[in-house]
Amino acid sequence: MKKRVQMLKKIQFPAMQAKPGPALASAGINMPDFCSQFNDKTKDRAGEIVPCIITIYEDKSFDFVLKTQPAAGMILKAAGVKKGASNSKTELVGKITYDQAKEIAEHKMADLNAHDIDAAARIIAGTARNMGIEVEGLE
């Protein structure tokens, strides 16, 4: 018999640092069990923020899928800045090269809605521009 899905929940934790709390309480799952599984699966991703989609079933069992680190975090790291511009139309806080955008796109390709690496790199470049980060080498 197939399990019935009760809800989907999207959360983010730093790798290896999931702990029981309000973010998980509303899901109604066994929090220590989820935290130990999440921390175990993210051992190799230290220093990253890891988005996760939890599928919660009616019997309170769950499955989860780990996603790639958010593009914004990767762009900030590549540009060497702490945060994006408060007004991206008038303020530039850093620069990345098109090659760096392409590298980020290759890492995120599984989670992006793009047919090829150049389209994915343009998506990343758009995110960077919206953060006040200039992309050098983009036509």
Image: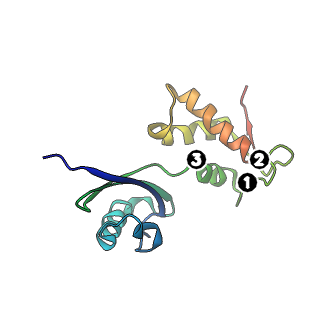
Residue drawn at x 30%, y 64% as measured from the top left: 37
Pick the front one: 7 or 101: 7
Q: Is residue 13 left or right of residue 79?
A: left
Among the two numbered marks 2 and 1 on one chain, the one whose residue lies closer to the N terminus: 1
In the image, is residue 108 above or below residue 54?
above
Question: Which quadrant, please, contains the C terminus?
Answer: top right
* Residues at circles 2 and 1 in contact by the CB criterion of under 8 Å: yes
Q: Quadrant of residue 17?
A: bottom left
Category of crowding for the residue at label 2, using alpha-carbon neighbours closer than 10 angstroms: few (below 14), some (14–19), many (at least 20): many
Q: Which mark is residue 32?
A: none
Observer able to see residue 116? yes
Q: Which mark is residue 132?
A: 2
Establish if 10 lies above or below 124.
Answer: below
Residue 53 shows up from this direction = no
Give the x, y percent position of residue 67. Answer: 43, 49
> What amino acid is found at the position of numbered circle 2 in the picture?
Gly
Question: Where is residue 34 drawn, in percent x and y?
Answer: 32, 66
In depth, the one of 39 and 62 nearer the eye is 62
Query: Does residue 20 appear to the left or right of 115 in the view shown?
Result: left
Q: Which residue is mark 3?
A: 71
Which residue was labeled with disc 1? 84
Give the secondary structure at mark 3.
helix
Residue type at mark 3? Ala
State yes or no: discs 2 and 3 in contact (Cβ < 8 Å).
Answer: no
**Which amino acid lies under the numbered mark 1 shown in the image of this protein?**
Gly
Q: Quadrant of residue 35?
A: bottom left
User: What residue do we see at 66% from left, 35% from top?
Assistant: 98
Which callout, 2 or 3, points at the residue further toward the start of the chain?
A: 3
